[in-house]
Amino acid sequence: MKAGVTGVGHLGYHHARIMKTLADEVMIHDTDPVRLQKVSEELGIQTAGSIEELVEWADALDVSCTTSAHYEVVQTALNSGVPVLVEKPIAATVEQGLEMVETAGEKGLVLAVGHIERFNPAMIAVKDAIQTPIFMEGHRLAGFSVRATDVSVVMDLMIHDIDIVLWKAASPVAEIHASGVPVLTETVDICNARILFENGAVANLTASRISAEPKRKLRFFQKHGYVSVDFAAREVTALQLKGGSIVPVPVTVLESDALTAEIRSFLSAVTDNTPVAVSGREGLKALTAAAAILEKSEKSILNLP
């Protein structure tokens, strides 16, 4: 398996590092030649001078470049017959994401989306225990960083939890309500969203990139049970109604690296035809919901004094 990685910045560096341990051969590309050369020397990986060169060489492509470039790069790969793993969000716009999903379908190629929290060992430990949640509550809070401030907190952080609640609700979205404000940047820095599903389930999500204390936690309430997933600490709390009492449910969280599991899952889908953990269509659903939340948040800004 010859795997290409495009975009070797903050996150892409680790994609390349891990890919080197899993694929037979790896080639990397980046629009910044200085960064490309630096990563190439550090990791001992060959480089491509262009996306076209990388796509022509590769059997599979890992797209970790900036979101605004996802569409062009992914379409180039898919139209050349190369399966793709693309970082979240799948694309900059819903329209672009839809085209990418349609192209993958027409070509019969794997298109996986890197929603990494699906591979968090805490989430893996309880994914089967969360069956029919009726209420979900998420808080994803981070301190301010100049990285990724070109996109809103919805697309940068909240989309992780959007993907999880869409997955576990397993029901179409009926309504979305949201409000958000820009505080330190020109885009939304803190946002609260309420997602109502057709099956009656509800998800309340809050995301902030201007918080003093970091938090990455989702709580799931279902009939006779409760599950809390702490993605940062990789810990789980599970409670169940049993014999008229609330009792703790033992949960074993097996240590694993989420990004390694994500990339391994993609390569397995390419070589062994196993199902991808997050398909292009699922990534598109998350993007569609995130776009609706962002639109409603931006409208709420207009009402500020």
Image (cartoon, rainbow, N blue to C red):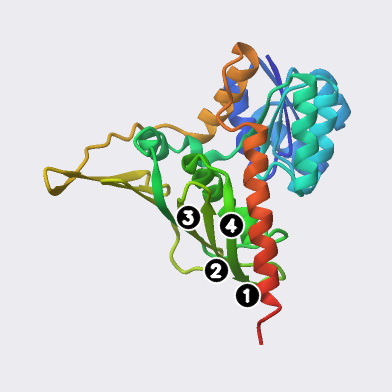
Q: CA distance from mark 3 to mark 4?
A: 11 Å
Q: Position of residue 225 (x, y in %)?
A: 27, 46
Label 4 neighbourhood size at 10 Å, few (<14), some (14-19), many (20+)? few
Of the image marks 1 and 3, the number of the one nearer the N terminus: 1
Against 215, is 108 above or below? Answer: above
Secondary structure state at the residue bearing disc 1? loop
Split into 4 quadrants, where in the image is the N terminus? top right
In terms of depth relative to the viewer, which is nearer, 141 or 41?
141
Identify the amino acid type marked 3.
Ala
Which numbered disc, 3 or 4, marks the residue closer to the eye? Answer: 4
Residue 149 lies in what quarter of the image? bottom right
* 206 w.r.t. 184: above or below: above
**SS at circle 2:** loop
The three-letter code of the residue at mark 4 reads Glu
Q: Amino acid at mark 2?
A: Ile
The residue identified by callout 2 is 210
Q: Residue at x 58, y 28 (%)?
A: 263
Left or right, 151 with respect to 154, comes to right
Percent x, y of residue 106? 80, 23
Between label 1 and label 4, give the one nearer the viewer. Answer: 4
- Give residue 203's mark: 3
Q: Quadrant of the C terminus?
A: bottom right
